[in-house]
Amino acid sequence: MSYHIQPQDNLDPSVVFDKGCAESHLKQLTHAIIYQLKWIDINNRVLEDRKAFKTPSVYPLTEDEVYEKFYKEARAEAEAIIEVERKHVVENRATHIRNTLNLAIKTLQFLVYTPRGTKGKVYTERKLIRDPRTGSFEERDVQYFESYPEGEERLNQISMATRNCDFSDYVPYMSEELKALWVKCGDLSHFEGGRVVKDAKTEKAKSESEEIPKADTRTA
């Protein structure tokens, strides 16, 4: 397909993938293409007048009329150009994407498999947590991987590794190889979940008993 404005092949990813930037880029392209279409229309009219041995007439359309006449065509072409530019961005970053996904996969494989060789689970548990500032307890949901409390830090590590898999905007423009890596990364970061229900009063009593110092049994 030929374009009135040629797609760029070295754009920053944000220009075509960030929502606000992409919309601004789309508007700029649309207006630039309308301008091109207007001058093509002007030249065609001049050519027709010359072929008919007439003096070229004044262009009859106002700017608003030009916009109305060419907007739909220009907008469609601008959208097609951005699709090509997005493909170029992903192709240019293929090595970075591949390396990032492979590293995330290795990290997740280390983090999500238990010593049993099976994939672990993420649990949600209602716990009484002591506020270090006031010493009082409050109930809140705590998520952890496999066991508490060490599983909280492990879950944070898993979340950090999972963020490196976040190429969802790029997926439609990826090669099959990169799509397969992205799917594998997503599968590793998806867990079966469970909810642990415990008696809050029992948990509070247990927590308080752990805070009470043992009595000094030494005799004078």
Image (spheres, rainbow, N blue to C red):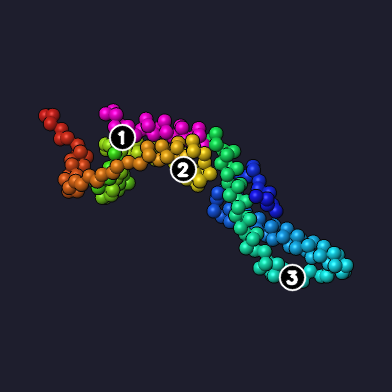
What x and y, as percent, mark residue 63? Answer: 72, 68
Q: Measured along the vertical axis of the image, is residue 219 above or below residue 1? A: above
Q: Cα distance, mark 3 to mark 2?
A: 48 Å
Q: Amino acid at mark 1?
A: Lys
Q: Quadrant of the C terminus?
A: top left
What x and y, as percent, mark residue 16? Answer: 58, 49
Q: Is residue 175 magenta?
A: no
Q: Amino acid at mark 2?
A: Asp
What x and y, as percent, mark residue 126? Answer: 25, 47
Question: In terms of depth relative to the viewer, which is nearer, 13 or 54?
Answer: 54
SS state under label 1? loop
- Residue 216 tag number: none
Question: In terms of depth relative to the viewer, which is nearer, 113 or 208?
Answer: 113
Q: Quadrant of residue 202?
A: top left
Q: Is residue 201 left or right of residue 25?
A: left
- Badge 1 is on which residue? 119
Residue drawn at (52%, 41%) of the image: 174
Q: How many marks?
A: 3
Q: Amino acid at mark 3?
A: Leu
Question: In terms of depth relative to the viewer, which is nearer, 154 or 3?
Answer: 3
- Badge 2 is on which residue? 166
Q: Is residue 178 left or right of residue 55?
A: left
SS state under label 3? loop
